[in-house]
Amino acid sequence: MKTDYDVVVVGGGVVGCAVARGLAQYRIGACLVERELDVSLGTSCRNSGVLHSGINYKPGTLRAELAVRGNAMMDELCRDLKVKIRRIGKLTVALDRDDLPGIERLHAQGQANGVPGLELIGPARMRQIQPNVQGIAALWSPTSAIISPYGLTIALAENAKANGVDIRLDWPVTNVNVLPQGRGFEVRNDRGDMLTCRVLVNAAGLFAAKICEMVGIGDYRIYPCRGEYYVLDKRLGGSLRTLIYPTPNPKKPGLGIHLTPTVDGNILIGPSADYQDSPRWTGNEAPVMASLRDEGLKLLPDIRVSDYIRTFAGLRAKRTPPEVGGNADFVIEDRPDVKGFVNVLGIESPGLTSSPAIAEMVLGFVGNHLELRRTPDFNGARPGSALSFSERSPEERADMIAADPDYGEMICRCEGVSKREVLDALDNPLGARAFVSLKYRSRVSMGRCQGGFCFPRIVRLLREEFDWEWEDFVDHSAASAMFSGCALDGGEGR
């Protein structure tokens, strides 16, 4: 297996995968390494899935510039990669007169940033956009959108792989040796495997400061900030036509608790914002979840207890400590003191929105060290469709079943996922085999029963048709075994 590359990208989040796909357009040897068993298992799968317009960021900052640029790139990118995107716009609401200066400030800021279509509107126009919305005024930003964050990240990685970029999963970087005379880097993992490269791109998210330390840069610190969410049942999916945000407090680490519709029909309540020491812990805390329930009922009184189907949490990679709050700008730099080290650090919101624009900027820096000649063989389009089997017309579904009977067997009843879709998810180009890899590619276990119906069927399928042993079943990491005490000889465990 190849070990010598022109470029190695550290980190399989949405930014790292966007960079990898960008590198695939050129005649260079590139590799992406990711510490987890699949891409998108960190911040990139645990967020609201919102594409921001660019109103929330100070003019002249990278966050402002790259959010507006990245937002404008998303329609074409999602079309090519077969990723769902919905341009539903956003209302930033002033609940009372005290909030009016806040939305006026955002309006002026958005105009300075070049955000298209912004309007300051009153209650009548607000309720045309979203019936029953409360408030005395709002800022309407029509380019705000929703997307599947893990869907985009996976699509970027799989398209990069299809175009010749090596993707190495379960490859945690534990040491980087900077070679003398600017000759590049030796990158090692915890098993002693080594890769060499001329250019190293640090897109390691919550661990980016540690990668910096490995090459002798001690300038940065990352402060993990946890955001918790509720997921609501699809029963309420038609309740929100647009994104509705409160007027933000510039001193707070996030944009406030809000309701967010998803491209798959659920609604999210959140996120909270609480600093913590661990860059890995994504549990939920009862007092926070109680607060989210209270806030959710204020915004959507129709919520029933039975509508809460799941909780989750994600971590922001913040550069500002808790005593400071607020947000710092992105760090995207071609380090003059470590030749060939391209540093991408502190990418919190709007990192998802900005990801294709960040990749453009990174490629410009890579071009400072390597000759970038485009390859005529690059194919930026993924096969297939953004629509799942259950989203097709009855006539299309009938034709698909006639051509392949595996479409006619339902594995996940809540989400309408067929056996063929589970098999295709298992046969993914990256070779990812964790249960969460099936989940994010096919939506099995993401419905109301949260796997109660489909999980036994998936287990039976993998045991009987692919000879999986009980020890092969892990949720998201080697340490997340899904079975304990089962016979491994196929006897009692069956």
Image (cartoon, rainbow, N blue to C red):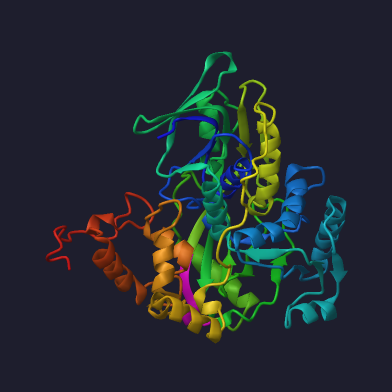
Point 70% across, 70% down: residue: 244
> Quadrant location of residue 407?
bottom left
What range is drawn magenta here?
Answer: 304-311
In this rendering, the answer to whether 305 lies above or below 200 is below
In the drawing, does residue 256 fall left or right of residue 33?
Answer: right
Asked whether residue 153 is in view, the answer is yes
Find out whether residue 469 is within the magenta segment.
no
In the drawing, does residue 345 fall left or right of residue 403?
Answer: right
In the drawing, does residue 118 fall left or right of residue 469?
Answer: right
Q: Position of residue 425 (x, y in %)?
A: 43, 62
In front: 187, or 167? Answer: 167
Q: Position of residue 283 (x, y in %)?
A: 44, 57
In this rendering, the answer to whether 169 lies above or below 215 is below
Count of all numbered marks drawn on residues in the image = 0
Point 71% across, 61% down: residue: 75
Point 37% across, 60% down: residue: 435
Residue furthest bottom as drawn: 394
Q: Position of residue 475 (x, y in %)?
A: 36, 58
> Quadrant location of residue 418?
bottom left
Point 55% across, 22% down: residue: 184
> Quadrant location of residue 265?
bottom right
Q: Position of residue 120 (x, y in %)?
A: 86, 67
Residue furthest top as drawn: 181
Asked whether residue 315 is in view, the answer is no
Position of the N terminus by quadrant: top left
